[in-house]
Every structure is written in structure tokens, then in C-alpha cells.
Amino acid sequence: MSTTKNWFKTWFNTSYYHILYQNRNDKEAQFFIRNITSFLHIKQGDKLLDLGCGKGRHSIYLNSLGFDVTGADLSSNSIKHAKQFENDHLHFFEHDMRDPFTSKFDTIFNLFTSFGFFEDDTEDLLVLTNIKNGLQKNGKAVIDFMNAAKVIRNLVPEEVVSRGNIDFQIKRRFENGFIIKDIAFSADNEEHQYTERVKCLDYKKIEGFLQKAGLSIDSSFGDYDLSDFDATNSNRLILVVS
């Protein structure tokens, strides 16, 4: 059971997390990567960081495009899986994004809502400060976050998601500034319960965090096709910052 403020340390490190989310759209992810790397004019051999890389799906594709990629994630199990794909220009390591980096990068990616997990705003600010300090001169960072307003408006309170022989009972709610997802299921002769908590950060709130970290917004997009961000209708809030 995960009930602590660091829920992600437990949940992200389980096999069940990856079972629940096994149907993520790789074609959509690759479409976005092609679009954003083209927009940013990222060059062959540029050093990129995929911060919160999970099992490495974005990192691996970035590397296939000719970039020098480092993937970093808190989950030891995810990094262990990703390491099988390493090569001379693709490396993975276990890292808490609240800790500073020992290298600098031309571009830092924080993708698929890998931000806003922390109870305390100072920890979110610390992540952005680390990103700022981890960029080369003239480097850029890309933060791909949910459009919180639309997510709240379309929140599905309860549903059952079946993956093989596991039925995930999911309940969602908006509470104290967080979108909270309670996940309960039976597997391996045990009852399991986990909770996801993601902070509802709109454009203005994230912009305030960025300014405190010494970063500013260069561009904003509302979807993986890089359409303009619309606070009411966009599916994503994608920010290019420097």
C-alpha cells in the first residue's frame, strides 16, 4: 500500500504500474518527439536528458534519431529494464529529480506529466532549479504536462480497467489542489492499493515556479502536434523554457 507523500517511490517501482499503463501510445509519443526536436533544431550529437524516463520509451526513440541521450528515473526496476537498450550514445541511471545533475545538457525533457508529484511546492521548485542548472548555455527544457483544467472538467470518478487477469478498480477525485487516483486490485494472492497524486498546475502557476527558478517560457503548445495552447480545450500544456 502506498499512502506516504512519496507514493511514487513505491508505485512506479512495481510491475503492476507497468501492467496498468501498458497500452500507452508509442506512435503518439514518437510523433511528438519528431515534432519537438524539429522545432528546437536539435542537432545530431546534442546531449539530451530524459528526466523521469520510466522504462525509456522516449529516450530510446530520441537515440534512434541520432542524439546522445541520458535517461534518468527514480525507479530502480524501470532503469534496470531500460539498461538493456544502452549503447555508446544512450545511457540510463537511477536519479531523483530533486537531486542536482553532475552533467550539463543541450536539452532536458520532462515528458508525459512527470512533474508535480510533490506535496511541497518547494520540491517542485527544486526540480526546476536543477533543470536550470543542468542546461548548457543557450540550452532549452521541454515540460510536457497535463492541461489540469480540462482533466478536472472531464474527470471520470470511477472505472474498472482490465489488464489480463487483473481488474484495476480506479477512483478519481480533485482534492486540495491535487488530482488523486486511488487504485485497488487483487493480484498474486494479495490485495493491493496505491494512490497517485498529481498537482493541478495551470499555466500561471507553472510560470510562477519557472520564474523563481530563473527560467522563462519561450513557447507553449496544447498538443503533440504543437498546436497553440488553449486553456479550455487543449489536451496538454507543453512548455519550452530557457
Image (spheres, rainbow, N blue to C red):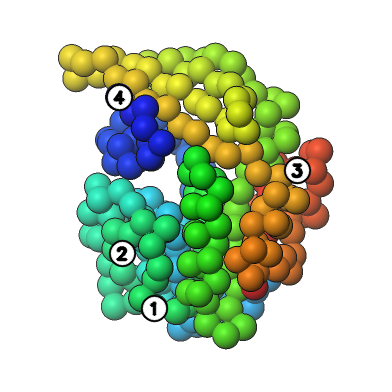
SS for dot 3: loop
Residue 105 pos. (x, y %): 47, 77
Residue drawn where x is 30% and y is 48% of the image = 75
Return the residue nearer the eye: 50 or 36: 50
The quadrant of the image that shows the N terminus is top left
Q: Looking at the image, is mark 3 or mark 1 nearer the viewer?
A: 1
In the shown orientation, is residue 101 left or right of residue 178? left
Tell whether label 2 touches label 1 (CB within 8 Å).
no
Q: How far separated are the C-alphas under marks 1 and 2?
A: 13 Å
**Residue at point 58%, 33% (across, down):** 178
- Asked if labels 2 and 3 touch by Cβ distance under 8 angstroms, the answer is no
Q: Which of disc 4 and disc 3 is earlier in sequence?
A: 4
Q: Against 23, is 100 above or below?
A: below
- Identified by mark 3, the residue type is Ser
What residue would you read off at disc 2?
A: 92
Measured Cα–Cα span from mark 4 to mark 2: 28 Å
| Residue 221 horizontal/vertical position (percent) | 73, 56
Q: Which of the labelled discs sits on residue 1, or is there none?
A: 4
Please rate how many residues cluster around mark 4, counting C-alpha atoms within 10 Å: few if below 14, some from 14 to 19, many from 20: few
Lower position in the chain sequence, tag 3 or tag 1? 1
**Amino acid type of disc 4?**
Met
Q: Which residue is mark 1?
A: 103
Q: Disc 1 to disc 4, how far (Cα)? A: 35 Å
Question: Quadrant of the rendered structure where residue 187 is?
Answer: top left
Q: Secondary structure at mark 2?
A: strand
Q: Residue furthest left?
A: 189
Q: Which structural element holds mark 4?
A: loop
Query: What is the crowding at mark 2: few (fewer than 14 residues within 10 Å), some, or many (at least 20)?
Result: many
Position of 235 compared to 142: left or right?
A: right
Distance of label 3 from label 1 (alpha carbons) = 34 Å
Q: Image point 62% across, 83% down: which residue? A: 138
